[in-house]
Image (cartoon, rainbow, N blue to C red):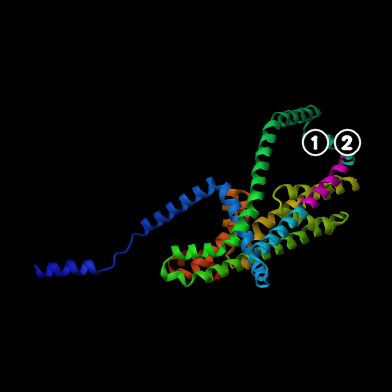
């Protein structure tokens, strides 16, 4: 009887190991719930996180202005107006390019009329597509465009309203984050355990440095993409190749519209100044290839090096962010993953996640 009691006492004293499968299932549940919240809360989270991005990047400047005896409200106002002015300059440059492109539309139409018979003959002789089939295709395309015009206008209207709402809320959120930053720090101190409270300020400082490195890495990406664009345009002999290559690269800051309008300029120039359709086609191929390299090779590697993130985790963040939030997610998810890596550096329970995210562990582990 006494031996049975001792055996029970020994078994109760032994540590209980959790089932790895149950722990993995809990992780999956947390990830699933988080993804659902992020997807359906896009309208809230996207401008909120963009505001946090602006606030963290501009915090050192705001702190410096306050040390120069400038009131916090005035410092924040000056910073926000500067950020808005930069964005407006980009929009004005984009509008200037669009105006030039619209001015050249009559010349482009005349060139296309000249090339149209040659294109029809080439399709007929090489692809076996007769004139009647080509006419039917054109008519079908025009009919589909007319039928889908109302839906496209509705989608464009909804997208414009959503974008305007986001553009208005981003500086508001950024201002509130900067002005009430001590309140947010106190809140974080109140919800974490005493074990990690001394590491909180280190994590916050590293997060600010992470967002700065993200912006710096993104700037390097634009320089590399601009250089590749310019080299391709120079090989084709396009006028002002370096200027248009760099503008097209930096205009990708404005999602979709920026790259379309900026790329249209060298395409139009190639169409007007050259006597072959292969030149504008070559411009389109160069921009498409460089954009593919930028999204899948250059951006993950360069930004990953700046943030000390593995290329694998950076690429996964880009794809996941694009699926959930589109272009905004592609921009926001990378610094969020970098902050998760910083937290995992300080929390032993997240060591397994840190191995996946850390660049050194990822390549040398």
Residue that appears at 47% across and 73% down: 198
Of 68 and 253, which appears nearest the observer?
68
Rendered view: 178 above or below 329: below
Residue 265 point in image, percent of width and height: 83, 49
Most frequent secondary structure within the magenta stretch: helix
Q: Is residue 359 visible?
A: no
Q: Nearer the viewer, mark 2 or mark 1?
A: 2
- Left or right? Give the position of 326 relative to 350: right
List the residue tagged with mark 1: 123
Query: Neighbour class for label 1 at 10 Å: few (<14), some, many (≥20)?
Result: some
Highlighted magenta segment, given as a residue range: 91-105
Tag 2 near tag 1, CB within 8 Å: no
Residue 97 point in image, percent of width and height: 82, 49
Q: Which mark is residue 113?
A: 2
Q: Based on the displayed image, in which of its 4 quarters is residue 77 positioned?
A: bottom right
Q: Is residue 55 visible?
A: yes
Residue that appears at 42% across and 52% down: 29
Of 21 and 71, which appears nearest the observer?
71
Rendered view: 269 above or below 140: below
Q: Give whichever of discs 2 and 1 has the lower sequence position.
A: 2
22 within the magenta span: no
Secondary structure at badge 1 equals: helix
Q: Which mark is residue 330?
A: none
Q: Based on the displayed image, in which of its 4 quarters is residue 156 positioned?
A: top right
């Amino acid at each position: 009887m006494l031996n049975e009691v001792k055996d029970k006492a020994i078994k109760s004293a032994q540590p209980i190991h959790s089932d790895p499968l149950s722990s993995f299932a809990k992780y999956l549940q947390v990830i699933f719930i988080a993804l659902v919240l992020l997807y359906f809360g896009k309208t809230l989270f996207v401008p909120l996180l963009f505001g946090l991005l602006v606030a963290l990047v501009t915090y050192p400047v705001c702190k410096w202005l306050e040390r120069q005896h400038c009131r916090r409200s005035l410092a924040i106002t000056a910073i926000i107006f500067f950020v808005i002015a930069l964005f407006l300059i980009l929009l004005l440059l984009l509008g200037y390019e669009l105006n030039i492109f619209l001015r050249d539309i009559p010349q482009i139409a005349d060139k296309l009329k000249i090339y149209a018979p040659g294109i029809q003959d080439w399709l007929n002789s090489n692809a076996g597509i007769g004139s009647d089939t080509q006419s039917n295709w054109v008519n079908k395309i025009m009919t589909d465009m007319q039928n889908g015009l109302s839906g496209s206008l509705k989608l464009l209207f909804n997208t414009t309203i959503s974008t305007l709402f986001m553009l208005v809320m981003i500086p508001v959120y950024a201002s509130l984050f900067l002005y009430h930053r001590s309140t947010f720090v106190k809140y974080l101190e109140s919800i974490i355990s005493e074990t990690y409270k001394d590491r909180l300020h280190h994590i916050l400082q590293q997060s600010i440095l992470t967002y700065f490195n993200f912006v710096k890495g993104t700037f390097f990406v634009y320089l590399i993409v601009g250089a590749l664009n310019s080299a391709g345009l120079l090989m084709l002999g396009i006028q002002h190749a370096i200027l248009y290559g760099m503008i097209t690269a930096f205009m990708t800051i404005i999602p979709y519209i920026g790259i379309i309008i900026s790329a249209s300029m060298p395409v139009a120039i190639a169409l007007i100044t050259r006597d072959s359709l292969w030149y504008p086609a070559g411009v389109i191929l160069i921009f498409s290839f460089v954009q593919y390299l930028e999204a899948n090779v250059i951006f993950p590697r360069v930004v990953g090096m700046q943030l000390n993130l593995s290329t694998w985790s950076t690429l996964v963040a880009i794809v996941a962010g694009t699926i959930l939030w589109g272009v905004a997610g592609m921009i926001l998810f990378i610094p969020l993953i970098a902050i998760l890596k910083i937290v995992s550096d300080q929390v032993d329970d997240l060591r397994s996640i840190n191995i996946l995210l850390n660049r050194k562990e990822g390549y040398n582990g």
